[in-house]
């Protein structure tokens, strides 16, 4: 069974404070886009065997899909029931696009079907929250506001499709470091999330550009000039709304239509080193993501 595992971008991230458990309390609005890995799940005698098309991704217990399989076995009392998982990677790694979280979410769906476990939405959401803050959102994708450490997800009905160009400079930003750089006094108030939610629900793509906000961006921008480099490329292409996704380094820009996104992405690929990755993407609906 092969499942598509979509990338997400954060259109807004607001940090509220640091929690006793070391995580930050956040509110974020996210959307899945049609840049996707493929996660292929099949039976084997015992144990977990992972392969990945990208040699930079670990295939041992550090891989989130390995942890997902272990958690499902443990919770469902399945001993060492075997699974083979192949990940065809297209989403840049450690890029703020939740590639690993999406792979883990699709592994939960895949194992539920492969092993006929009959896990419901709530069971899957509980397992997902144990694996990582973005995993519950990735179970279904679409557009949602996530709170807590990101695991409490409220889906939004956001009519229409949005189109973006993603520029991903060749560096990895560790999420933990990016969060540790945040200073409460520099943050905006949480109204940015209410505003962008209402703009998304109204399908008002024109107003979206002025609502984008990421509390993590200033520190990552200060430490890595590539973020401004990516922003500069999108600004030169005439884009007005742009933002770093998650803890970076991917920067996305809003484009009115898919054909224009493809054209801009093509032009930008001709202007950057091959190690910089550029994608034209569009909203992917919840229906696309579910098994
Ligand atoms: P997020 O936006 O959820 O913080 P990210 O997009 O910034 O995630 P990932 O691509 O998920 O980051 O990778 C973060 C780290 O997780 C990398 O250092 C990578 O080695 C490790 N990792 C573990 N499992 C996977 C996987 N299945 N795919 C990609 N990276 C993985």
Image (cartoon, grey):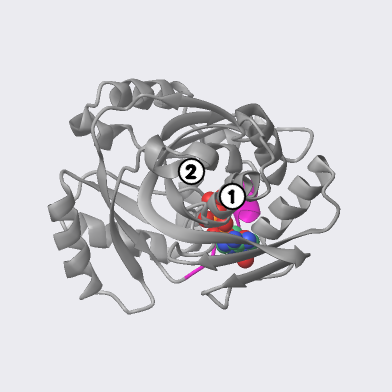
* Residue found 42% across the figure and 65% down from its top: 225
Q: Is 177 included in the stretch rendered in magenta?
A: yes
Where residue 74 appears, x then y in whole percent? 83, 46
Classify mark 1: residues with Cα within 10 Å, few (<14), some (14-19) or many (20+).
many
**Range shown magenta:** 171-180
Q: Is 62 included in the stretch rendered in magenta?
A: no
Q: Main secondary structure of the magenta part?
A: helix
Where residue 29 appears, x then y in whole percent? 44, 33
Picture disc at residue 291: 2
For mark 1, give the secondary structure.
Answer: helix
Res 142 quadrant in image: top left
Picture disc at residue 216: none
Vertically, is 231 above or below 218? below
Vertically, is 227 above or below 149? below
Res 256 quadrant in image: top left
Vertically, is 164 above or below 90? above
Q: Determine which residue is flagged by label 1.
A: 110
């Amino acid at each position: 069974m092969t499942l598509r595992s979509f990338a997400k971008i954060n259109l807004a991230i607001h940090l509220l404070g640091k929690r006793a458990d070391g995580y930050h309390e956040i509110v974020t609005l996210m959307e899945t886009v049609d840049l996707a890995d493929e996660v292929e799940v099949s039976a084997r005698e015992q144990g977990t065997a992972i392969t990945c098309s990208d040699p930079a991704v670990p295939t041992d217990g550090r891989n989130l899909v390995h942890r997902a399989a272990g958690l499902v076995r443990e919770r469902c009392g399945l001993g060492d029931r075997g699974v083979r998982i192949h990940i065809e990677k297209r989403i840049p790694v450690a890029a703020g696009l939740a590639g690993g979280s999406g792979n883990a979410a699709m592994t939960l769906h895949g194992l539920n079907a492969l092993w006929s476990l009959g896990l419901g939405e709530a069971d899957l959401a509980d397992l997902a929250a144990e694996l990582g803050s973005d995993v519950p959102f990735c179970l279904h994708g679409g557009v949602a506001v996530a709170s807590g450490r990101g695991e409490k997800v409220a889906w939004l009905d956001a009519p229409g499709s949005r189109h973006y160009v993603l520029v991903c400079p060749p560096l990895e930003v560790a999420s933990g470091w990016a969060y540790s750089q945040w200073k409460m006094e520099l943050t905006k108030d949480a109204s940015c999330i209410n505003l962008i939610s209402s703009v998304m629900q109204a399908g008002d793509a024109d107003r979206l550009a002025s609502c984008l906000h990421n509390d993590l961006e200033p520190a990552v921008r200060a430490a890595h000039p590539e973020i401004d480099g990516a922003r500069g490329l999108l600004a030169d292409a005439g884009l007005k709304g742009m933002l770093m996704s998650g803890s970076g380094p991917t920067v996305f820009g809003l484009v009115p239509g898919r054909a224009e996104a493809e054209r801009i992405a093509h032009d930008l690929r001709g202007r950057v080193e091959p190690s910089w990755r550029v994608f034209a993407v569009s909203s992917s609906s919840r229906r696309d993501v579910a098994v």
